[in-house]
Image (tube, helix red, strand yellow):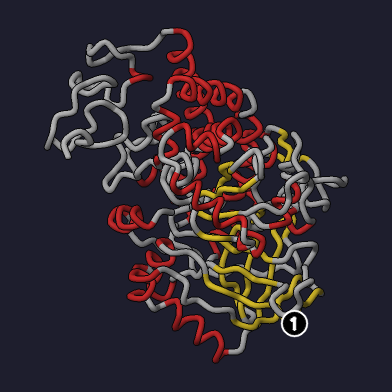
Amino acid sequence: MGWGRWSVIAASLVLAGCASKGVASDGGTRSPGGGGGSGGIGGGHAGASTGAGGALVDASAQTGGGPPCSDLFDQNMVRTYSIDIDPSEWARVMSEFNQLATLVASGNDFAVRHPVVFHLGSETVSNATLKLHGQSSWAQTAMLDGTRAKIQFDVSFHQSDPSGKFHGIEKLVFDMPRSDWTFMHDRLAHAWLRQVGIAAGCAANARVEINGSYYGMFVAEENTNKRVIAEFFPNNPSGGLWKGGIQPETSLTLQAANPSRQATFAQATDLARITAIVDLPSSVVEWASEALLNNADGTYGGNHNFYIYDQGAKGFVYLPNDTDSTFDWLSLFDLTPFNDHPIYWWVGRAAPAPVPTGVWLAAMNDPTWRSKYVDALATQLGKWNVQQIQGWIDTWSQQIAADVAADPHTWASPAQFQMAVSTAHDVVAERAQFLQTFVDCERNGSGADQDGDGVRWCEDCNDSNRAVHPGAAEICGNGIDDNCNGAVDEACH
């Protein structure tokens, strides 16, 4: 979640209670109706489960392609990870967690690694480390939730041993912002992105115990790192990877050639220079994918929660990052539940509205690339299997419901969890239907012109104001993007 958006959430939510603590399982809890067989997403037990309405749904996410995942991400079970940490070390973690002034002023770079002992059933890693992560979601829970405040963190297995891995994974990220009432956003988003060939780490829900007590429900995931990059870019596995286009993510990124490439990317403001350094054909496919996910805060919905990966001659490609503001998020916490415009997605959003990047504006203000983006939306719509994704939501929400209710650090009540799950289920179909009407409007000349300014809604950033449309004169000082180019009063300075 973007740093500029957190105040909107904080102002709009009311703290809710949860049910009592549940019973821990040893290594993992079988999902309701989980079947036998082998070869699921995580290499564990995969089978069909009964979803809402009695329909038979496949609990495995890897039904349509994508590289196989570690068995840690078996979608038919919720694993329980136990973390032992010395009480004095835990006190230091909590001290970091409550340094709100530093977090707000400088970000989370002050967080350090803490030694822990990590368990999964009978397996133990004695030299693992834990580090807090997050920024706006960290601030929200630390500021608002008191004793129910919930840390997000990663556990690394390779800090002490550079070759250290756990079930093939160097680092597990435990993510659960307080605004994901479904407890599944990253899990759902990553499952579909991987299925359609977009680079994203594997993800599954997980219970976490700390020093013998149930701490809470999370999404356990692998971040976009060298393993994920090697999976999706086998011919170019050693390029630079940058979070938000700025922050280096791997040691390879720091090699001499990569910073200069990143500087070229950062300085590319016009379409000619952008196309010389950015793989736009692949990037518009990623953007279209995030549009379908209804992402409020990624490449599609903001200007920092994304990765760029340097493929070499093909240039930088945009990749997803931080997909926890997807599906129902806009319905619950903003003003465009499923109908945020796929090009002018910042229009109509609650203040402070997200800001598009220069790359986005250059591409969308160009008729050729706008058309390619529309084509990408049409292609990804063809891969958006509403019944399958709704089946994931039905099955996985049943799988985690009891542990969500028992979570002593959750923000959402069981009723809010169920409401969010139902909303997410509906948005899967509603978003696809809305985007199909957009594609039809762009391609076939259909679509209304509600404000009568001669521009159909799909081409107009504000179809309720006839003075605002592409080609309109920019009126200085009114604080409005009159000509729909993503800038305000740009000709007035």
The residue depicted at 53 percent of the width and 67 percent of the height is 152
The answer to whether residue 305 is left or right of residue 206 is: left
Q: Position of residue 100 (x, y in %)?
A: 36, 74
Q: Amino acid at mark 1?
A: Ser
Front residue (pair 237, 7):
237
Q: According to the image, label 1 marks what residue?
A: 126
Residue in view at x 77 percent, y 68 percent: 165
Relative image position of residue 19 (x, y in whole percent): 50, 64
| Snapshot quadrant of residue 467 | top left
Residue at horizontal 52 percent and vertical 28 percent from the top: 429
Quick check: can you spot residue 170? yes
The quarter of the displayed image where residue 1 is located: bottom left
Name the side, left or right, on which 104 lies relative to 170: left
Q: Is residue 425 visible?
A: no
Outermost residue on the right side: it is: 37
Q: Position of residue 163 (x, y in %)?
A: 79, 71
